[in-house]
């Protein structure tokens, strides 16, 4: 006698997902109606989904929550915006300890140090990427010097890279990777 029902459990609601309504993402199954951004609740598809741990986001909310923050990101030219995403359920991250130990800095807030050049980074020029402060001009690929954004950033061992340089230097090696069709590779 056949067993009726069954199937995978939805990654959002935990109920059974039947084949006709199944969307798969990152090895998990979802109902079509449950495949929504965790913050803004917009419907997602394979081109708009961004995954962090076990949570799914649209690319916009993912960038606001985990991407670089600071002057020049997210609003366009000439606009100021103090919205930190509280209305979307995003809690602002505030540093609990300041590495600057002077009494003035402890009382009035001293500048953090840039991860690339080591100079002070002030609020107007500060970008947070890979969990560290950067000057806008220092927020570049460590290999090629290309300017980075939240969508082009990859991090390895405290250094930031563009996706191309990261793939060439740390990605899979061998025939068919990193060179393109018909390219000659010169051994050094």
Image (cartoon, grey):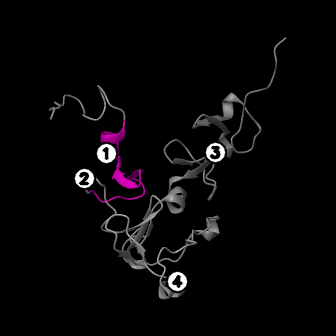
Q: Earlier in the sequence, mark 3 or mark 2?
A: 3
163 or 13, nearer to the observer: 163
> Contact, CB < 8 Å: mark 1 with mark 2?
yes
Range drawn in magenta: 146-171
Magenta segment includes 108: no
How far across and how far down the image is residue 61, in percent?
54, 59
Name the mark nearer the viewer: 4 or 3: 4
Q: Residue 106 got which mark? A: 4
Which is closer to the viewer, label 1 or label 2? 2
| Residue that appears at 55% across and 43% down | 45
Q: Are marks 4 and 1 in contact (CB under 8 Å)?
A: no
> Sequence order check: which comes first, mark 2 or mark 4?
4
Is the residue 111 above or below the residue 107 in the image? above
Q: Residues within 10 Å of mark 4 (few under 14, many from 20)?
A: few
Residue behind mark 1: 164
Q: Is residue 144 above or below residue 109?
A: above
Secondary structure, mark 4, is helix
**In the image: residue 21, left or right of residue 82:** right
Whichever of callouts 1 and 3 sits on the residue coming sooner in the sequence is: 3
- The CA distance from mark 1 to mark 3 is 30 Å
Q: Earlier in the sequence, mark 4 or mark 1?
A: 4
Q: Quadrant location of the N terminus?
A: top right
Residue holding disc 2: 144
How far is the residue under mark 3 from the one under mark 2?
A: 38 Å
Residue 59, given in percent of the width and then of the height, sits at 50, 53
Please give the residue where the numbered disc 3 appears in the rendered image. 35
Secondary element under disc 3, as helix, strand or loop, is loop
Q: Are marks 2 and 4 in contact (CB under 8 Å)?
A: no
Please identify, in this view, whether the residue under mark 3 or under mark 2 is nearer the observer.
Answer: 2
Closer-to-camera residue (25/32): 25
Gap between marks 4 and 3, in whole Å? 45 Å
């Amino acid at each position: 006698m056949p067993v009726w029902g069954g199937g995978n459990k939805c990654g959002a609601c935990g109920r059974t997902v039947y084949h006709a309504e199944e969307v798969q993402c990152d090895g998990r199954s979802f109902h079509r109606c449950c495949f929504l951004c965790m913050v803004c609740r917009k419907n997602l598809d394979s081109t708009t989904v961004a995954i962090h741990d076990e949570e799914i986001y649209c690319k916009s909310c993912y960038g606001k929550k985990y991407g670089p923050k600071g002057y020049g990101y997210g609003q366009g030219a000439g606009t100021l915006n103090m919205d930190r995403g509280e209305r979307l359920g995003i809690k602002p991250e505030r540093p609990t300890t300041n590495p600057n130990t002077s009494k003035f800095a402890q009382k009035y807030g001293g500048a953090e140090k840039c991860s690339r050049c080591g100079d002070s980074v002030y609020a107007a020029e500060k970008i947070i990427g890979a969990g560290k402060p950067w000057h806008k001009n220092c927020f570049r690929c460590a290999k090629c010097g290309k300017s980075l954004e939240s969508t082009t950033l990859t991090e390895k061992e405290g250094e930031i890279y563009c996706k191309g340089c990261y793939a060439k230097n740390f990605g899979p090696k061998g025939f068919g990777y990193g060179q393109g069709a018909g390219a000659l590779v010169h051994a050094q």
